[in-house]
Amino acid sequence: MKGPILTSLFIAVAGHAICQKIELPLKDSLIVYENVVRLDSTTKKDILYKRAKTWFINNSSTLKTTIDIDDNSNGTLVGKAEFKLSVPENAIVYFTRTCSFSIQVDVKDGRYRYKIFNIVTTRPYPHSVLVLDVSKNYMMYLKDEIRTYGFISKKRLSNDFRETFEDLDTNIKKIINSLRSALKSSQSEDF
């Protein structure tokens, strides 16, 4: 008697988890990850700036970062970054997209602010490149306005979107944690 009841309960909970929409941070209908992080008040702006710049440079091989604005006097670094994202093509095949975004780090004595924004994905095709605005697709996903293409059902496409947004969120949170670790680091700044 317990077996069928537990099985039914498991299926109901699993089904609900699959149908839930993932929540990403929105600001004016755009996906934006941002936060102000307070550290020990004795940590000086110049030290935080050096750590942030080192983080940009050290991640350039795995994250492919570039620095566009390097303003030490105002404590601002702005750059671009990208990583690879595995996206479902159908139930069996996954393809790789490049996820690109802007990242800004502002530092002051004892605190810093990070902001990740302008998130887009690109997918190469034989004779062109498809660029997708992630925020626009996320808003369509939230409003259940996903358009189907070919033989893929709306439910399947919605699940694919959810998986993509979950992967995106997971990767960006890893990047944020990496930045936090680098700026919190109390390792010697000298060689």
Image (cartoon, rainbow, N blue to C red):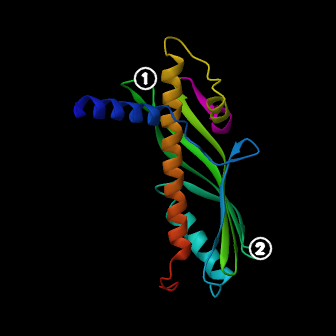
Disc 2 residue type (three-letter): Asn
Query: Mark 2 or mark 1, which is nearer the start of the sequence?
Result: 2
Q: Quadrant of the N terminus?
A: top left
Residue sitting at x 24%, y 34%: 2
Pick the front one: 183 or 162: 162
- Classify residue 77 as left or right of residue 151: right
Q: Is residue 129 magenta?
A: yes
18 w.r.t. 166: above or below: above
| Numbered disc 2: secondary structure | loop
Residue 45 in sight here: yes
Place of residue 164 in the rendered image (x, y in percent of width and height, measured from the top left): 50, 36
Report whether residue 87 is seen.
Answer: no
Number of marks drawn: 2
Local crowd at mark 1 within 10 Å, few (<14), some, or many (≥20)? few
Measured in 3D between alpha carbons, the distance from the residue under mark 1 to the one under mark 2, in whole angstroms, is 47 Å
Where is residue 153 drawn, in percent x and y? 50, 16
Q: Which residue is mark 2?
A: 74
Please tell me which residue lies in front, 74 or 190.
74
Amino acid type at mark 1:
Asn
Q: Is residue 132 left or right of residue 189?
A: right
The residue segment tinted magenta is 127-137
Q: State whether residue 177 is above or below residue 172.
A: below
- Mark 1 = which residue? 90
How busy is the neighbourhood of tag 2: few (under 14 within 10 Å), some, or many (20 plus)? few
Label 1 sits on a secondary structure element that is loop
Percent x, y for residue 176?
55, 60
The quarter of the picture where residue 92 lies is top left
User: Which image quadrant is residue 69 in?
Assistant: bottom right
For the residue pair 184 and 187, the one nearer the viewer reads as 184
